[in-house]
Image (cartoon, helix red, strand yellow):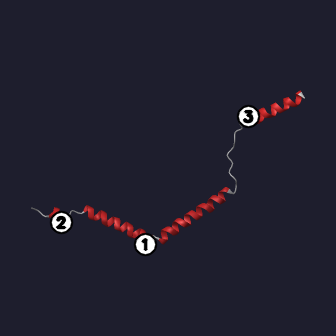
Amino acid sequence: MLFQWFIHYVSIGIASIPQTTRGYIDPNTGGMLFQILAVIFAVFSGFLFFFSRKIKSGFARIKRYLRRSDEPSSEEEKPE
């Protein structure tokens, strides 16, 4: 009986020792990451392709606005 208690406490003691974990990546993780990234890339490039005209016109509008704000107004050019 004493021997069983001894074995029981020793096994609990050994099991409670923290063990160092090694980094393990499942071999299929690379394929899964590739599939996820491929879908994200396809959605992003499709979004850019579908809305390219609106994106270009938005940038042109911003450039026109900045160009107008940089030009001196007609009131400032008149010498007095």
Indicate whether 66 appears above or below 10: below
Residue 18 marker: none
Name the residue located 61 percent from the left edge and 61 percent from the top edge. Answer: 36
The location of residue 58, given as percent across then percent down, is 38, 67
Name the residue located 40 percent from the left edge and 69 percent from the top edge. Answer: 56
Q: Residue type at mark 2: give it.
A: Ser
Name the residue located 73 percent from the left edge and 34 percent from the top edge. Answer: 17
Q: Residues within 10 Å of mark 2 (few under 14, many from 20)?
A: few
Tell me the distance, in whole angstroms, between the alpha carbons under discs 1 and 2. 33 Å
> Which quarter of the picture shows residue 61?
bottom left
Q: Which circle's residue, 1 or 3, is located before the other in the chain?
A: 3
Q: Residues within 10 Å of mark 1 (few under 14, many from 20)?
A: few
Tell me the distance, in whole angstroms, between the alpha carbons under discs 2 and 3. 82 Å
Residue that sits furthest to the front in the current view: 1
Residue 53 marker: 1
Name the residue located 46 percent from the left edge and 70 percent from the top edge. Answer: 51
Q: Which circle's residue, 1 or 2, is located before the other in the chain?
A: 1
> Which quarter of the picture shows residue 33?
bottom right
Q: Which residue is mark 2?
A: 74
Quadrant where the image shows the C terminus? bottom left
Q: Residue type at mark 3: give it.
A: Ile
Of residue 5 and residue 65, the one placed in the foreground of this image is: 5
Q: Which circle's residue, 2 or 3, is located before the other in the chain?
A: 3
The location of residue 35, given as percent across then percent down, is 63, 62
Q: Which residue is mark 3?
A: 17
Q: Secondary structure at mark 3?
A: loop
Is residue 73 rendered to the left or right of residue 5?
left
Q: Residues within 10 Å of mark 3 (few under 14, many from 20)?
A: few
Q: Are marks 1 and 3 in contact (CB under 8 Å)?
A: no
Tell me the distance, in whole angstroms, between the alpha carbons under discs 1 and 3. 63 Å
Q: Secondary structure at mark 1?
A: helix
Q: Residue type at mark 1: give it.
A: Arg
